[in-house]
Image (cartoon, grey):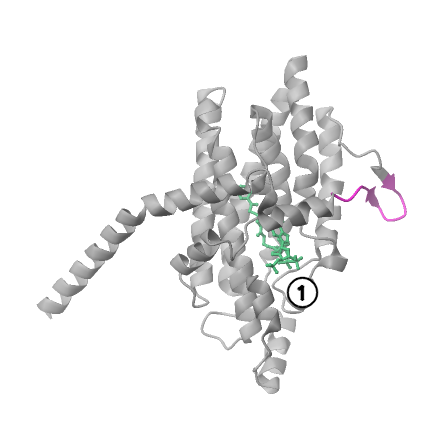
Amino acid sequence: MYAQMIKSEASTDDPEQLKEFQAKIDADIKVEPRDWMPEGYRKTLIRQIGQHAHSEIVGQLPEGNWITRAPTLERKMILLAKVQDEAGHGLYLYAAAETLGVSRDDLTEQLLSGKMKYSSIFNYPTLNWADIGAVGWLVDGAAIMNQVPLQRTSYGPYSRAMIRICKEESFHQRQGYDIMMKMAQGTEAQKKMAQDALNRLWYPSLMMFGPSDKDSVHSTQNMAWKIKMNTNDELRQKFVDQTVPQAEYLGLTIPDENLTWNEEKGGYDYSDPDWSEFFDVLKGNGPCNADRMEARNKAWDNGAWVRDGLMAHAEKKRAAKTAAE
Ligand code: BYC
């Protein structure tokens, strides 16, 4: 795919410039759009930021699906605000990617043609209201775990976008946990729905951190460049350690018989997700991949007249300005 194309390209960068660049990264000096950067650094950032932006946009679909069915007006308003935040996150991230010389249209077209990915988690359905709680609690919880360190990432525009995004993500996680608390303290049927949502979304949430370190293609180089601050397994472990006590407080059971506290490592031992399922979802075979791509393609096609109108307006303004000069 796209990243494989990057990896197979031989570096044509000057070794001296590469050395200076690495020294700058090691000294925690931010890289800004006009600074020199290795071609591999630029391309891998476009891949990661673009994939992240697409995830925010596609991530609106499973939750947007519940706006009309939220159980109270207050819950509807909160969910609406959250989904709008996700659109905003997508836009900050597309803007950050544009500073690397790629247009938002290009990135969108690569998503729609299947060349670029979005987070695997959004290929799972939200079947009942408790799923919306579990998405906020687990999916936004996993997102924060990954994104808080990314506030210190080496590329300035990405790091600054992450600072804004993280503030909103923590509200998202709390609204999800609040739904889970209500459900878990509710009737037997509501508690069952909460447990069922946790059962279905636990392993897909663990997959959000990416494959295990031994199968992660990009981690070593991306950590050296501080595009990524932690390995996939490090963040997954932190997420498990943070989430288990939260589940206990709710009176819910994590669906993992092997979950045990390991005193020596100071963290939980847990079962890995089924990695064959993860790679299958990445190939497009998850329960909702086809639906998600159909929805995004439809939105893109239906929005063509708006984009054309805006371009025509900009062109008219430009022509009027030129005529006046
Ligand atoms: N899903 O070498 P690796 C959100 C791919 S939005 C799909 O470890 P890397 C939210 C990976 O791309 C959350 N693909 O990769 C929104 C690579 O394939 P390619 C999104 C995945 O990049 C709305 C291959 O597997 N967050 O939270 O070093 C509502 C090998 O992996 C996934 C971000 O995007 C996956 N889960 O590490 C609510 C954060 N995992 O490209 C919530 C920024 C791996 O070579 N991104 N792959 O074909 C990152 O931190 C990193 O890109 C990842 C993966 C940790 C995700």
Residue 141 coordinates in the image, percent (x, y): 63, 41
Q: Nearer the viewer, residue 37 or 285?
A: 285
Residue type, mark 1 in image: Met
* Screen quadrant of the N terminus: bottom right
Q: Residue at x 59, y 29 (%)?
A: 131
Count of numbered circles in the view: 1
Q: Main secondary structure of the magenta part?
A: loop
Residue 244 coordinates in the image, percent (x, y): 75, 35
Query: In the rendered structure, does residue 60 fall within the stretch colored magenta?
Result: no
Residue segment shown in magenta: 261-273
Q: Nearer the viewer, residue 145 or 303?
A: 303
Residue named by callout 1? 223
* Screen quadrant of the C terminus: bottom left
Q: Secondary structure at mark 1?
A: helix
Residue 121 coordinates in the image, percent (x, y): 60, 42
Query: In the rendered structure, does residue 263 fall within the stretch colored magenta?
Result: yes
Can see residue 308?
Answer: yes
